[in-house]
């Protein structure tokens, strides 16, 4: 039995069962590949998983957003911020607040985390003003996330965070988070920080 992924016809119960099996298989394949550090195979599994979940739940579902979020991380690890930006656009469309064009689905923390990931993708593309803007979406609600990927703190008020003085793109909850992120952030900040800061200053944000 084959499934027409372009069809909008409701699924038969047999088709649904088959798709659920395929979903479980691809999820497992992605997990195994990630556990062994095989980014390429993990990405392939997520790109097979997304059309399956689209047919099962719709493209604007939390399940698809979750898969795009995982794929986005792997794309960033693979040095492909352009593709990661596209993946996070779909994540934000589902998770972000209505005033930012999102559907406001899922946990608020996940929406805020998606903004931070999008910020990193935009930095990688040289879109520094957009990187800062997307991170600052939560400033009026006091939900901005620390930019250190090792930080597990809840989203904070903007006034509780310090920005990186080198680039003005990233925000940190503490000097220890800034120090621990420097290993990852150093190259970007040293190569592009001055340009990023100048563009952000001109934009006045
Ligand atoms: Zn910086
Ligand atoms: Zn932190």
Image (cartoon, rainbow, N blue to C red):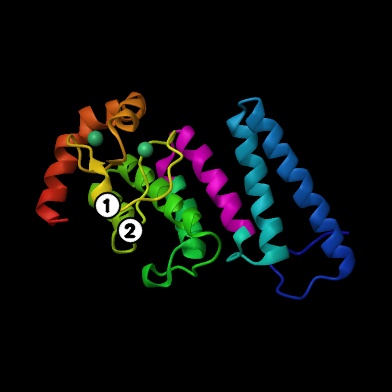
Magenta includes 68? yes
**Residue hosting label 2:** 142
Residue 182, how many percent across, how many down?
31, 27
Question: Quadrant of the image for the N terminus?
Answer: bottom right
198 with respect to 9 (left or right): left
Which quadrant of the view contains residue 76?
A: top left
| Majority secondary structure of magenta residues | helix
176 or 192, nearer to the observer? 176
Magenta run includes residue 194: no
Residue 24: x and y in percent read 78, 48
Per the model, the C-alpha gap separating discs 1 and 2 is: 6 Å
Q: Which residue is mark 1?
A: 158
Q: Residue at x 17, y 56 (%)?
A: 205
Q: Which residues are magenta?
A: 63-82
Left or right: 70 as drawn, with respect to 76: right
70 to 78, vertically: above or below? below
Q: Secondary structure at mark 2?
A: loop
**Residue 127, can we see it?**
no
Q: Are the two marked residues, 1 and 2, in contact with CB atoms closer than 8 angstroms?
A: yes
Q: Reading the chain from its start, which is encountered first: label 1 or label 2? A: 2
Q: Which residue extends farthest bottom?
A: 9
Q: Position of residue 124 (x, y in %)?
A: 33, 40
Q: Quadrant of residue 179 in the image?
A: top left
Ligand 2 within 8 Å of disc 2? The answer is no
Relative height, residue 87 to residue 183 (above, below): below
Q: Residue at x 43, y 67 (%)?
A: 97
Ligand 1 lies in which image quarter?
A: top left
């Amino acid at each position: 039995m084959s499934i027409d992924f372009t069809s909008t016809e409701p699924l038969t119960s047999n088709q649904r069962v088959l798709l659920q099996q395929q979903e479980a298989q691809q999820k497992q394949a992605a997990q195994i590949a990630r556990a062994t550090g095989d980014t390429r195979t993990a990405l392939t599994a997520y790109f097979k998983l997304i059309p399956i979940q689209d047919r099962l739940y719709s493209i604007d579902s939390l399940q698809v957003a979750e898969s795009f979020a995982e794929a986005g991380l792997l794309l960033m690890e693979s040095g492909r911020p352009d593709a990661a930006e596209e993946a996070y656009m779909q994540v934000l469309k589902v998770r972000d607040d209505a005033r930012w064009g999102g559907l406001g689905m899922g946990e608020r923390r996940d929406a805020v985390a998606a903004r931070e990931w999008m910020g990193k993708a935009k930095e990688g593309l040289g879109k520094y003003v957009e990187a800062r803007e997307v991170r600052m979406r939560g400033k009026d609600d006091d939900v901005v996330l620390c930019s250190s990927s090792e930080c597990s703190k809840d989203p904070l008020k903007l006034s509780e965070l310090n920005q990186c003085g080198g680039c003005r793109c990233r925000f940190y909850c503490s000097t220890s988070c800034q120090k621990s992120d420097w290993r990852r952030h150093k190259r970007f900040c040293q190569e592009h920080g001055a340009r990023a800061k100048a563009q952000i200053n001109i934009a006045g944000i």
